[in-house]
Image (cartoon, helix red, strand yellow):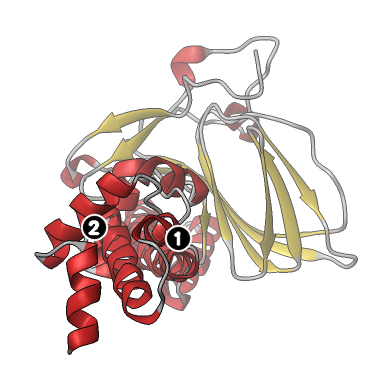
Amino acid sequence: MSDKDPSYPLRKQVPSRDWSPGIHYAQLQTLPPCTFARRRLYDFELLYVRQGKLLTKMDTEEYILNAGQLIFLSSGVYHQNAILSDSDTKLIGIHFDFFGESIITHDEDMVVNEDEVMHEKFAFEAVTAPFMPLSQEPIYSPPPECVHAMEQLVHEFTMRPVGYEWVCRGLLLGILTSLLRTQNSRDAAKSSVHTERIRALIDEIEERSAERWTNKSMAKAMNMHEDHFAKLFREVAGMPPGEYLRSIRHREARKLLRETDWPIERVGEQVGYPDIHYFSRVFTANEGISPRAYRKLSRIL
Protein backbone atom coordinates (compact mmCIF):
# COMPACT_ATOMS: atom_id res chain seq x y z
CA MET A 1 0.00 0.00 0.00
CA SER A 2 1.33 3.48 -0.87
CA ASP A 3 2.04 6.10 1.75
CA LYS A 4 -1.02 8.04 0.66
CA ASP A 5 -4.16 5.90 0.52
CA PRO A 6 -7.10 8.03 -0.69
CA SER A 7 -9.50 5.73 1.21
CA TYR A 8 -8.47 7.22 4.56
CA PRO A 9 -9.55 8.82 6.70
CA LEU A 10 -13.04 7.40 6.44
CA ARG A 11 -15.59 10.18 6.95
CA LYS A 12 -19.25 10.30 7.88
CA GLN A 13 -21.47 13.39 7.51
CA VAL A 14 -23.62 13.49 10.65
CA PRO A 15 -25.45 16.06 12.80
CA SER A 16 -23.60 17.22 15.90
CA ARG A 17 -26.04 15.37 18.18
CA ASP A 18 -24.65 12.07 16.89
CA TRP A 19 -21.12 12.80 18.10
CA SER A 20 -20.49 10.50 21.06
CA PRO A 21 -16.72 10.05 21.35
CA GLY A 22 -15.02 7.22 23.14
CA ILE A 23 -11.66 7.93 24.80
CA HIS A 24 -9.10 5.11 24.58
CA TYR A 25 -5.95 6.74 25.95
CA ALA A 26 -4.99 10.08 27.50
CA GLN A 27 -1.58 10.72 28.95
CA LEU A 28 1.13 13.28 29.59
CA GLN A 29 4.38 12.18 27.96
CA THR A 30 8.00 13.30 28.43
CA LEU A 31 10.22 12.00 25.65
CA PRO A 32 13.94 12.32 24.83
CA PRO A 33 15.15 12.97 21.25
CA CYS A 34 14.11 9.94 19.18
CA THR A 35 12.36 8.78 16.03
CA PHE A 36 9.34 6.51 16.24
CA ALA A 37 8.34 3.78 13.80
CA ARG A 38 6.11 4.64 10.89
CA ARG A 39 2.58 3.49 11.68
CA ARG A 40 -1.17 3.78 11.22
CA LEU A 41 -3.92 3.99 13.82
CA TYR A 42 -7.33 2.39 13.96
CA ASP A 43 -8.59 5.37 15.95
CA PHE A 44 -7.70 9.10 16.03
CA GLU A 45 -5.11 10.93 18.11
CA LEU A 46 -4.70 14.51 19.29
CA LEU A 47 -1.00 15.12 19.93
CA TYR A 48 -0.27 18.44 21.65
CA VAL A 49 3.25 19.82 22.18
CA ARG A 50 3.53 21.34 25.66
CA GLN A 51 7.30 21.84 25.46
CA GLY A 52 9.94 21.17 22.81
CA LYS A 53 9.59 20.41 19.11
CA LEU A 54 7.99 17.57 17.17
CA LEU A 55 8.33 16.49 13.53
CA THR A 56 5.47 14.52 12.01
CA LYS A 57 5.63 13.03 8.53
CA MET A 58 2.12 12.29 7.26
CA ASP A 59 1.31 11.14 3.73
CA THR A 60 3.73 13.17 1.61
CA GLU A 61 3.82 16.15 4.01
CA GLU A 62 6.16 17.07 6.84
CA TYR A 63 4.93 19.15 9.76
CA ILE A 64 7.14 20.75 12.42
CA LEU A 65 5.26 21.55 15.62
CA ASN A 66 6.53 23.91 18.28
CA ALA A 67 5.24 24.31 21.81
CA GLY A 68 1.58 25.34 21.77
CA GLN A 69 0.68 23.44 18.59
CA LEU A 70 -1.37 20.30 18.08
CA ILE A 71 -1.60 17.76 15.26
CA PHE A 72 -4.70 15.73 14.45
CA LEU A 73 -3.62 12.20 13.47
CA SER A 74 -6.24 10.37 11.42
CA SER A 75 -7.35 6.75 11.43
CA GLY A 76 -5.81 4.81 8.56
CA VAL A 77 -3.26 7.46 7.57
CA TYR A 78 0.44 6.60 7.70
CA HIS A 79 2.52 8.88 9.91
CA GLN A 80 5.86 8.96 11.68
CA ASN A 81 6.80 11.13 14.66
CA ALA A 82 10.24 12.34 15.71
CA ILE A 83 11.36 14.43 18.70
CA LEU A 84 13.56 17.24 17.40
CA SER A 85 14.50 19.02 20.63
CA ASP A 86 17.92 18.52 22.17
CA SER A 87 16.24 18.12 25.54
CA ASP A 88 13.06 16.31 26.57
CA THR A 89 9.83 17.16 24.79
CA LYS A 90 6.55 17.17 26.70
CA LEU A 91 3.38 16.04 24.94
CA ILE A 92 -0.27 15.36 25.61
CA GLY A 93 -1.62 12.38 23.67
CA ILE A 94 -5.34 11.59 23.45
CA HIS A 95 -6.67 8.62 21.45
CA PHE A 96 -10.38 8.51 20.66
CA ASP A 97 -13.06 7.73 18.12
CA PHE A 98 -16.03 9.93 17.23
CA PHE A 99 -18.90 7.48 17.80
CA GLY A 100 -17.77 5.19 20.62
CA GLU A 101 -17.55 2.43 18.02
CA SER A 102 -14.01 1.16 18.67
CA ILE A 103 -13.35 -1.77 20.99
CA ILE A 104 -10.01 -1.06 22.66
CA THR A 105 -8.81 -3.42 25.37
CA HIS A 106 -5.05 -2.90 25.00
CA ASP A 107 -2.86 -0.09 23.70
CA GLU A 108 -1.90 -2.39 20.83
CA ASP A 109 -5.51 -2.35 19.64
CA MET A 110 -5.05 1.28 18.56
CA VAL A 111 -2.07 0.62 16.26
CA VAL A 112 -2.41 -1.27 12.98
CA ASN A 113 -0.44 -4.49 12.61
CA GLU A 114 0.36 -4.28 8.91
CA ASP A 115 0.71 -8.07 8.70
CA GLU A 116 -2.89 -8.53 9.82
CA VAL A 117 -4.85 -5.42 8.86
CA MET A 118 -8.46 -5.45 10.07
CA HIS A 119 -10.14 -2.96 7.76
CA GLU A 120 -13.43 -3.09 9.64
CA LYS A 121 -11.68 -1.55 12.68
CA PHE A 122 -10.77 1.78 11.05
CA ALA A 123 -12.85 4.45 12.78
CA PHE A 124 -14.93 7.06 10.96
CA GLU A 125 -14.29 10.80 11.27
CA ALA A 126 -17.44 12.78 12.04
CA VAL A 127 -18.07 15.79 9.80
CA THR A 128 -20.76 18.37 10.52
CA ALA A 129 -21.59 21.50 8.52
CA PRO A 130 -20.59 24.31 8.49
CA PHE A 131 -17.20 23.03 9.66
CA MET A 132 -14.58 21.36 7.52
CA PRO A 133 -13.19 17.95 8.60
CA LEU A 134 -10.65 18.28 11.39
CA SER A 135 -8.27 16.18 9.31
CA GLN A 136 -8.34 18.53 6.32
CA GLU A 137 -5.69 20.84 7.78
CA PRO A 138 -4.26 18.84 10.69
CA ILE A 139 -2.20 21.52 12.51
CA TYR A 140 -3.94 23.60 15.18
CA SER A 141 -2.98 26.21 17.76
CA PRO A 142 -5.55 25.52 20.49
CA PRO A 143 -6.56 28.37 22.83
CA PRO A 144 -5.65 28.17 26.55
CA GLU A 145 -9.09 26.89 27.60
CA CYS A 146 -8.74 24.01 25.15
CA VAL A 147 -5.32 23.09 26.54
CA HIS A 148 -6.76 23.23 30.08
CA ALA A 149 -9.55 20.88 29.01
CA MET A 150 -6.97 18.43 27.62
CA GLU A 151 -5.12 18.47 30.93
CA GLN A 152 -8.38 17.88 32.81
CA LEU A 153 -9.22 15.00 30.52
CA VAL A 154 -5.83 13.38 31.16
CA HIS A 155 -6.38 13.76 34.91
CA GLU A 156 -9.88 12.19 34.76
CA PHE A 157 -8.72 9.35 32.52
CA THR A 158 -5.70 8.64 34.74
CA MET A 159 -7.46 8.81 38.12
CA ARG A 160 -10.73 7.26 36.86
CA PRO A 161 -13.14 8.46 39.58
CA VAL A 162 -16.76 7.34 39.39
CA GLY A 163 -18.37 8.78 36.24
CA TYR A 164 -15.05 9.66 34.61
CA GLU A 165 -16.26 8.32 31.22
CA TRP A 166 -19.01 10.95 31.07
CA VAL A 167 -16.65 13.71 32.14
CA CYS A 168 -14.04 12.66 29.57
CA ARG A 169 -16.65 12.53 26.82
CA GLY A 170 -17.88 16.01 27.69
CA LEU A 171 -14.35 17.40 27.85
CA LEU A 172 -13.43 15.86 24.50
CA LEU A 173 -16.55 17.28 22.84
CA GLY A 174 -15.49 20.70 24.12
CA ILE A 175 -11.93 20.19 22.86
CA LEU A 176 -13.09 19.15 19.38
CA THR A 177 -15.52 22.08 19.25
CA SER A 178 -12.74 24.48 20.21
CA LEU A 179 -10.51 23.12 17.42
CA LEU A 180 -13.34 23.40 14.90
CA ARG A 181 -13.94 27.01 15.89
CA THR A 182 -10.31 27.89 15.21
CA GLN A 183 -10.97 27.08 11.55
CA ASN A 184 -12.81 30.40 11.21
CA SER A 185 -9.89 32.46 12.52
CA ARG A 186 -7.47 30.45 10.37
CA ASP A 187 -9.61 31.07 7.28
CA ALA A 188 -9.73 34.78 8.11
CA ALA A 189 -5.94 34.85 8.38
CA LYS A 190 -5.65 33.14 5.03
CA SER A 191 -8.06 35.62 3.52
CA SER A 192 -5.89 38.43 4.87
CA VAL A 193 -2.80 36.84 3.30
CA HIS A 194 -4.59 36.51 -0.04
CA THR A 195 -5.71 40.13 0.21
CA GLU A 196 -2.13 41.32 0.59
CA ARG A 197 -1.02 39.18 -2.35
CA ILE A 198 -3.79 40.58 -4.55
CA ARG A 199 -2.84 44.12 -3.59
CA ALA A 200 0.74 43.36 -4.59
CA LEU A 201 -0.57 42.00 -7.90
CA ILE A 202 -2.57 45.19 -8.44
CA ASP A 203 0.63 47.19 -7.99
CA GLU A 204 2.27 45.03 -10.66
CA ILE A 205 -0.63 45.62 -13.05
CA GLU A 206 -0.31 49.37 -12.45
CA GLU A 207 3.40 49.27 -13.31
CA ARG A 208 3.14 46.92 -16.29
CA SER A 209 -0.39 47.36 -17.62
CA ALA A 210 0.72 46.72 -21.22
CA GLU A 211 1.63 43.10 -20.48
CA ARG A 212 -0.72 40.28 -21.40
CA TRP A 213 -2.70 39.83 -18.18
CA THR A 214 -5.44 37.18 -18.21
CA ASN A 215 -7.58 35.78 -15.40
CA LYS A 216 -6.07 32.37 -16.04
CA SER A 217 -2.45 33.54 -15.87
CA MET A 218 -3.05 35.70 -12.80
CA ALA A 219 -4.89 32.91 -10.96
CA LYS A 220 -2.07 30.51 -11.77
CA ALA A 221 0.54 32.96 -10.46
CA MET A 222 -1.48 33.29 -7.25
CA ASN A 223 -1.89 29.49 -7.03
CA MET A 224 -5.69 29.84 -6.90
CA HIS A 225 -8.65 28.48 -8.80
CA GLU A 226 -9.65 31.01 -11.47
CA ASP A 227 -13.16 31.59 -10.10
CA HIS A 228 -11.91 32.00 -6.53
CA PHE A 229 -9.21 34.41 -7.70
CA ALA A 230 -11.74 36.53 -9.63
CA LYS A 231 -14.02 36.68 -6.57
CA LEU A 232 -11.21 37.78 -4.22
CA PHE A 233 -9.86 40.27 -6.76
CA ARG A 234 -13.28 41.89 -7.06
CA GLU A 235 -13.55 42.13 -3.28
CA VAL A 236 -10.21 43.94 -3.08
CA ALA A 237 -10.30 46.10 -6.25
CA GLY A 238 -14.05 46.71 -6.38
CA MET A 239 -14.32 45.37 -9.96
CA PRO A 240 -13.43 42.22 -11.92
CA PRO A 241 -9.78 41.77 -13.04
CA GLY A 242 -10.50 42.42 -16.75
CA GLU A 243 -12.44 45.58 -16.01
CA TYR A 244 -9.72 46.81 -13.67
CA LEU A 245 -7.03 46.20 -16.29
CA ARG A 246 -9.03 48.11 -18.91
CA SER A 247 -9.45 51.04 -16.53
CA ILE A 248 -5.70 51.22 -15.90
CA ARG A 249 -4.92 51.05 -19.61
CA HIS A 250 -7.53 53.71 -20.39
CA ARG A 251 -6.11 56.03 -17.76
CA GLU A 252 -2.61 55.59 -19.18
CA ALA A 253 -3.84 56.10 -22.75
CA ARG A 254 -5.52 59.39 -21.81
CA LYS A 255 -2.29 60.56 -20.19
CA LEU A 256 -0.17 59.69 -23.24
CA LEU A 257 -2.64 61.32 -25.63
CA ARG A 258 -2.53 64.53 -23.59
CA GLU A 259 1.19 64.67 -22.85
CA THR A 260 2.90 63.24 -25.95
CA ASP A 261 2.81 63.62 -29.71
CA TRP A 262 3.11 59.89 -30.27
CA PRO A 263 1.05 58.46 -33.13
CA ILE A 264 -2.21 56.87 -32.01
CA GLU A 265 -0.87 53.45 -32.97
CA ARG A 266 2.14 53.85 -30.66
CA VAL A 267 -0.07 54.97 -27.78
CA GLY A 268 -2.16 51.85 -28.23
CA GLU A 269 0.91 49.62 -28.25
CA GLN A 270 2.28 51.32 -25.16
CA VAL A 271 -0.83 50.58 -23.10
CA GLY A 272 -1.31 46.99 -24.32
CA TYR A 273 -3.39 47.28 -27.52
CA PRO A 274 -1.08 46.67 -30.52
CA ASP A 275 -4.05 46.63 -32.94
CA ILE A 276 -4.91 50.28 -33.61
CA HIS A 277 -8.48 49.49 -34.65
CA TYR A 278 -9.15 47.50 -31.48
CA PHE A 279 -7.53 50.24 -29.39
CA SER A 280 -9.74 52.88 -31.00
CA ARG A 281 -12.89 50.83 -30.35
CA VAL A 282 -11.99 50.18 -26.71
CA PHE A 283 -11.01 53.80 -26.08
CA THR A 284 -14.18 55.13 -27.73
CA ALA A 285 -16.34 52.73 -25.74
CA ASN A 286 -14.81 54.01 -22.49
CA GLU A 287 -14.46 57.72 -23.29
CA GLY A 288 -17.33 58.36 -25.70
CA ILE A 289 -15.00 59.86 -28.34
CA SER A 290 -12.08 58.49 -30.39
CA PRO A 291 -8.43 58.77 -29.29
CA ARG A 292 -7.76 61.38 -31.98
CA ALA A 293 -10.76 63.48 -30.96
CA TYR A 294 -9.78 63.18 -27.28
CA ARG A 295 -6.26 64.46 -28.01
CA LYS A 296 -7.61 67.38 -30.04
CA LEU A 297 -10.16 68.31 -27.37
CA SER A 298 -7.65 68.05 -24.50
CA ARG A 299 -5.33 70.53 -26.23
CA ILE A 300 -8.10 73.02 -26.87
CA LEU A 301 -9.07 72.90 -23.22
Instruction: Report the front residue among 263 and 214.
Output: 263
Taking 256 as reference, is 151 left or right? right
**Label 2 packing within 10 angstroms: few (<14), some (14-19), many (20+):** few
As shown in the figure, which amino acid type bears the numbered disc 2?
A: Glu
Q: Considering the image in quadrants, where does the C terminus appear? A: bottom left
Question: Quick check: marks 1 and 2 in contact, CB under 8 Å?
Answer: no
Tell me which label, 1 or 2, sits earlier in the chain: 2
Q: Is residue 234 above or below residue 17?
A: below
Q: Which of the two marks, 1 or 2, is nearer to us in this view?
A: 1
In the picture, the disc for residue 270 is 1
The residue at 36%/39% (across/down) is: 98
Say which residue appears at 50% left-offset and 34% top-offset.
43
Q: Can residue 114 be spotted in the picture?
A: yes
The picture places residue 175, in percent across and down from the top left corner, at 39, 60
Tell me the crowding category of disc 1: few under 14, some 14 to 19, or many 20 or more residues within 10 angstroms, Cα based: some
Residue 213 or residue 73, whichever sits in front? 213
Seen from this angle, which residue lies furthest left? 288
| Residue 67 point in image, percent of width and height | 66, 70
The relative height of residue 7 versus residue 174 in the rendered view (above or below) is above
User: In the image, is residue 129 above or below residue 173?
Assistant: above
Q: Residue at x 47, y 73 (%)?
A: 148
**What distance separates the C-alpha of mark 1 from that of mark 2?**
18 Å
Q: Of helix, strand and loop, which one carries label 2?
A: helix
Q: Which mark, residue 198?
A: none
**Which residue is disc 2 drawn over?**
243
Q: Position of residue 29 (x, y in %)?
A: 71, 59
Image quadrant in which you'd find residue 133: top left
Location of residue 269 in the rendering, given as x and y in whole percent from the top left corner? 43, 54
- Is residue 1 rendered to the left or right of residue 154? right
Disc 1 residue type (three-letter): Gln
The kind of secondary structure element at disc 1 is helix
